[in-house]
Amino acid sequence: MASSAIHSRETPAGLPALLDRDLSILSFNERVLDWARRKDVPLLERLRYLCIVSSNLDEFFEVRVAPHVEAALAAVRGQPMPGQLARIVDRAREMVDEQYRLYNHVLLPAFKKEGIRILSHGERNVAQRQWVQAYFNREVKPLLVPVGIDPAHPLPQVANKSLNFIIHLRGKDAFGRQNEIAIVKVPRVLPRVIELPERLAAGGKAFVLLSSVIRAHLAQLFPGREVDQFSQFRVTRHSDLSVDEDDVVNLRTALRQGLQHRHYGQAVRLEVSSSCSEQLSGFLLQQLELPPQALMRVNGPVNLVRLTQFIELAARPSLLFPSFKGSQPHQLKGVPSILAQLRKEDVLIHQPFESFEGVLAFLREAVRDPDVLAIKQTIYRTGSDPVMLDLLREAVRRGQEVTAVVELKARFDEEANINWAEQLEAIGVQVVYGVVGLKTHAKMLLVTRREGKRLRRYGHLSTGNYNPRTARLYTDISFLTADARITADMDELFMHLASQNPLRRMQKLLVAPFHLHARMLRWIAQAAAAARAGKDARIILKMNALTDQLLIEALMEAGRTGVQIDLIVRGACMLPAGLPGQTDHIRVRSVIGRFLEHSRVFYFRAAGQEALYLSSADWMNRNMMRRIEVARSGRKPGAQQALANRYMRRGD
């Protein structure tokens, strides 16, 4: 469990203190929540943004909050530790309260006007109640197992983020004992949103939530006893897998074993209904060994994320964003052969505005080319779409040598990547897992082709993943090239990942954790020196997160010298911009919209020298020091300026 969630080294004298990383992450989610408020956003999309915020908060608590919970518990034991659980939860609670206010008082009434209703038990008429009763008896009740709590039956293991009910009972059980507390765990296989038949929907669409169905019929689970109090509840658990790679024989097996325990890690947050009594919430906090600050009361279903099912079931295109399909990449229009085109010029694809199909077409052409001898690819987050797996399978069948560097430790995608690795090995792909202690986050695809008496390589580098689904939702930049120096660097890096031999000197690529961090610091220093000399100096950086302390301090020092710095940071940013006399030459913008901003682009200008990099890396310590990352520099000044104009307009 990383203590870095709490500690960081002090900022040097004269520089302002950095912003808190955890609070910066919460600020990002507040910006996402703004889209749920906007009346110009289609109604179902507003609900989707509400769900996205809930999903993001879940991950935040799963990954970032455990050290603060430990600190709060230590304080209770009289062993003070640095932590800020109350501050974090209070900030998150304000956001959650606003989510439920929007859900209950804005979105639900708006859906009702559209003829779409989510009915509570009190709103259901007799016929609707009868249908729900029958549904409960047929589909739900057979899967529920109420567990009475006594010395022989302690609180059952409650899975991470699962729906549960706690019940306080009156009367005696079958053995004449007054066991007052019972737990009902709700299986994940049950749908959280249930559509009523059209005949019961009064000309529109009507839905009920599973939590509402169960709470209306809890008494049926306890015949002969009275349900006195009850509440739905949900536990969030620490879910960041930690495996000592130096101390395991088989990383894949170790991760599989870790995945089995992820659902039952340390509890970090307890959500209950707003009406939950102090008696029941206090009992749960005690059983889960949580401090009082970890309790959150919600005015509605405890898991808004599952309302994405409602968006799908509502089936109202008029309440969604208009359908969007990326165009064919501009440089590939009318091109009969992508490989031939790359021999003429490099190709840039701006996703999703230009389709990821251009990348798939590149791989497809390579697979079906009899002169292609080998294909090498990194796999980080590929999703469930089998298109790339099918192409690699076809390549093996055609006799090509296929190597896949699979990152098993991609957070929350570990199981999917283990499955990918096993499927690839089963079809004859050479699967390697990179360097011990480092995540392989670089996005690379390399094709080797025989052309006459020589071998030529063709490469693809990207700021985003090889995931056809997210490629339609994330903004990223793909770069296709036949440049001999770039592709030689790519081949050298693949060899390093497979053999773990020393990495030789790169010609065109910067690679973390070897060169990238130092080169970025050098460019910042060059811009600062140019500004001190009264020369032109400019920095524009686009990334997902800016939290590396050394890079932030270097940017603040450069800003003091007069360097004009624009930072386009979607998520966490710890640099305090706009402070008079200190960081007033630095502007920070966060772009939130229909598509998730995901590209990383770094532009520097110092005394007439220019450099522009496309990268897989954010400016975080983990990216610079604990991951394999790649940044490619622009080759020609004209191409650099075109990229700056095309992709960095937001910094001007």
Image (spheres, rainbow, N blue to C red):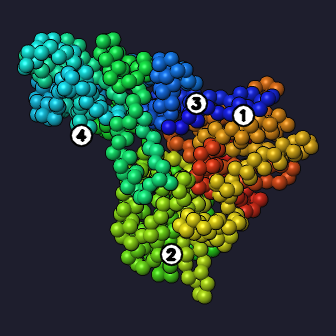
- The answer to which of marks 2 and 1 sits earlier in the sequence is 2
Q: In the image, what residue occupies the spot 51% across and 25% down? A: 71
Name the residue at the bottom extreme.
453
Q: Furthest-right residue in view?
A: 533
Report x, y in % for residue 588: 68, 34
In this view, the residue in front, 116 or 212, is: 212
Quadrant of the image containing the C terminus: top right
Q: Nearer the viewer, mark 3 or mark 1?
A: 3
Q: Amino acid at mark 4?
A: Val
Mark 1 vs mark 4: give the one in front.
Answer: 4
Q: Earlier along the polypeptide chain: callout 2 or callout 4?
A: 4
Say whether marks 2 and 4 touch (CB < 8 Å): no
User: Callout 2: few (<14), some (14-19), or many (20+) C-alpha neighbours within 10 Å?
Assistant: many
The quadrant holding residue 170 is top left
First-in-chain label (3 vs 1): 3
Q: Marks 2 and 1, how far apart in space?
A: 46 Å
In the rendered structure, are the residues bearing label 3 and label 1 in contact, judged by CB atoms less than 8 Å apart?
A: no
- Inter-mark Cα distance, 2 to 4: 43 Å
Mark with earlier residue (1, 4): 4
Rendered residue at 82%/26% (across/down): 581
Q: Residue at x 35, y 33 (%)?
A: 161
Q: Nearer the viewer, residue 607 or 146?
A: 146
Q: Secondary structure at mark 1?
A: strand
> Considering the numbered disc 3 on the image, is that residue within a helix, a strand or a loop?
loop
Residue 374 circle label:
2
Label 3 sits on residue? 6
Q: Which residue is mark 4?
A: 189
Q: Residue type at mark 2?
A: Ala
Residue 436, x across and y down, in percent: 53, 56
Identify the residue under disc 1: 587
